[in-house]
Amino acid sequence: MSKRFENRNVLVTGGTRGIGRAIVERFAAEGANVAFTYRSSREEADALIASLTGQGFKAKAFQADAADFTAAETAINEVVTDWGSIDVVVNNAGITRDGLMLRMSQDDFDAVVGTNLKSVFNYAKAAYRPMMKQRSGRIVNMSSVVGVMGNPGQTNYAASKAGIIGFSKSLAKELGARGVTVNVVAPGYVETDMTGALSDAAREAMLGAVPVGRPASPDDIASAVLFLASDEASYITGHVLHVDGGLAM
Ligand code: NAD
């Protein structure tokens, strides 16, 4: 039986750890050629490439700050040149710089919006022409339950993640007739380095509000991303898929 993403070319931003890494590994296991970006974690990127190619998968890594448009163009163009098409873009890279408004600096706001939201514009814009020409493509953007519900101390993060939803719905309307879908995954509490920084009290309070009573694993989120990127999801666009154990009902 052929694999779900056989001969598909996928690019994932922020692929070296956490949710991004799970997405990269799942796409590769399901037959895709996978490119991923990273900002500074060269050793982790090299180790991931070695692991993927060691298993016989085709893979590429790009050192690229997600907020940098030229780097996005370079990465997408190289995938198209070397592998022939860009079929799936997953905008996963994201950071937090939390703090109550009283203490939040302009730099905290700009850094989070630049990395989390401008990056989605960058990679969607770079993939736009090749996907239009192919008349097919999948763009999956990583939002958050915080972009839907808000969270004190995360005005910058919430703005970036809510912005991703508006951006994705608008682009979905622009690209629908071209065979390109644009969807959003909104995770709740996922156990990664990002949430590892939370205090035990914050973690318990968050988990107490999750109806399924456990945190998500990176794999729970990857499953939703792969579904939205698959042929089975061809009639779904502009959708926000909540993968949060029921947190945002
Ligand atoms: P993480 O901190 O473990 O990993 C983030 C990844 O993004 C890393 O690979 C990092 O290298 C990359 N990255 C960060 N800044 C970058 C930049 N400027 N350029 C390129 N890459 C960059 O975080 P995670 O928990 O795996 O989060 C992945 C995505 O999921 C983020 O967009 C995050 O906002 C979102 N999310 C996470 C949770 C959670 O509970 N962990 C919940 C909702 C949404």
Image (cartoon, rainbow, N blue to C red):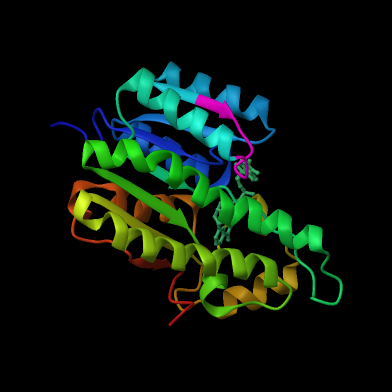
**Residue at the spot x=36%, y=37% of the render?**
27
Magenta extent: 61-68
Give the dominant element type of the magenta stretch: helix, strand or loop: loop
User: Which residue is at a point 69% across and 72% down the rendered structure image?
Assistant: 155
Using the rendered image of the protein, determine whether residue 192 is visible from the camera's viewpoint. no
Report whether 143 appears left or right of 55. right
Residue displayed at 60% across by 35% down: 38
Q: Considering only vertical position in the picture, is 111 above or below 106? A: above
Question: Residue placed farthest to the left in the image?
Answer: 1
Q: Number of callouts in the render?
A: 0
Residue 211 position, x and y percent, is: 46, 79
Coordinates of residue 95 in the picture (x, y in percent): 66, 53
> Which residue in the rendered view is the most extreme toward the right?
103
Image position, residue 126 (x, y; %): 44, 39
Q: From this viewpoint, is residue 85 visible?
A: yes
For the residue pair 170 and 236, the one nearer the viewer reads as 170
Q: Is residue 205 above or below residue 68?
A: below
41 left or right, relative to 169: right
Q: Quadrant of the C terminus?
A: bottom left
Residue at 50%, 73% (x, y): give it: 213
Camera-side residue: 1 or 160?
A: 160
Q: Nearer the viewer, residue 6 or 62?
A: 62
Q: Is residue 30 left or right of residue 205?
A: left
Q: Is residue 29 magenta?
A: no
